[in-house]
Image: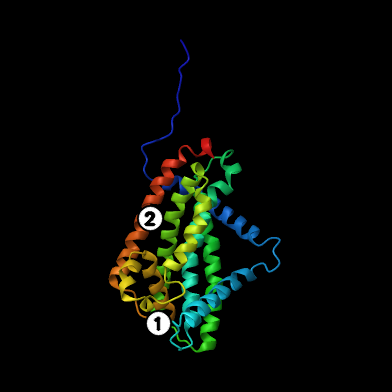
Amino acid sequence: MPPQLSTIRPFTSRLLPDFGELWLYRELVWTFAARDLRLRYRQTVLGVLWVVLQPIIAAGVFTVVFGKIAKLDDGDGRYFLLAFAGYAGFQVFQSTLAKAGASLLANAPVLSKVYFPRLVLPLSGILSTLVDLGIALLVFGGIALLKGVSIGWPVLLFPLWVLLALLLGLGAGLIVAAWSVRFRDVQHVLPIVLQLLVYATPVGYATAKVPAAFQPYLALNPLTGLMDGIRWSLLGMQAPSGGAVVWLCTASTLAVLAGLVVFTRFEQDLADVI
């Protein structure tokens, strides 16, 4: 009797990742996350102080450029905190996107030798992003206390804005990660896009200060609602409109779904092209 030939082919009809398999590898997510935290500030002079200095320096620059030079400061002494809160919130989105987008290429040697759900790598970067945010919030709370700024009940909704920022950044990052494997130019374009997005988003200025003629264009950016929501929660500023919140939630959900679909499709050929 002749031997039977078995052909193994990838499962091509799946649109989304196998979340059951991903759950089995959940400890690997923490392993990669812990590794990134250990290596992040090795051989740096200031170490973890960079996490403290980065938002302080950025908020200081925004305060000078937009608050003093562009004269957007209302003179209530809160502009530095306004810029600090905006930058901290934007960093959650930006850091998640950048880490997820670079996760596959950064771990190419591992991907070509060992099998595990590739989604583990983009997810592992979320932990360090949350650690950075936690440190930034401690600094923010200290400065707010010194300035006598009280924090009200809207702070209870702050985790919601963080979650939406993570989802939006992760969804975009999954697409960038998948495309970067085939098109290495994506990694060169991404920093430029993020830099431009800083100024297209009310990070260093309040949304209310934008002229009325430009408000409709600013509303197209889902991050606008995110900035307003974060400042409402941390500083008691004007709450985001219902439309802005709906658009932010919709964009975050669509971004994650699109990212998972694209990532799953490219994952099947990942080991062959990376």
The image shows residue 113, relative to residue 4, as above or below, that is below
N-terminal-most mark, 1 or 2 = 1
The one nearer the camera, 225 or 129, is 225
Task: Give me the residue at 36% from left, 43% from top.
Answer: 15
Furthest residue toward top: 1
The image shows residue 243, relative to residue 140, as above or below, that is above
Q: Amino acid at mark 1?
A: Gly
Relative image position of residue 155 (x, y in whole percent): 42, 77
SS for tag 2?
helix
Relative image position of residue 261 (x, y in whole percent): 38, 46
- Residue 5 visible in rendering: yes
Relative image position of residue 145 (x, y in whole percent): 52, 86
Q: Which residue is mark 1?
A: 236
Horizontal arrangement in the rendering, residue 43 relative to residue 167 (left or right)? right
Q: Which residue is mark 2?
A: 255
SS for tag 1?
loop
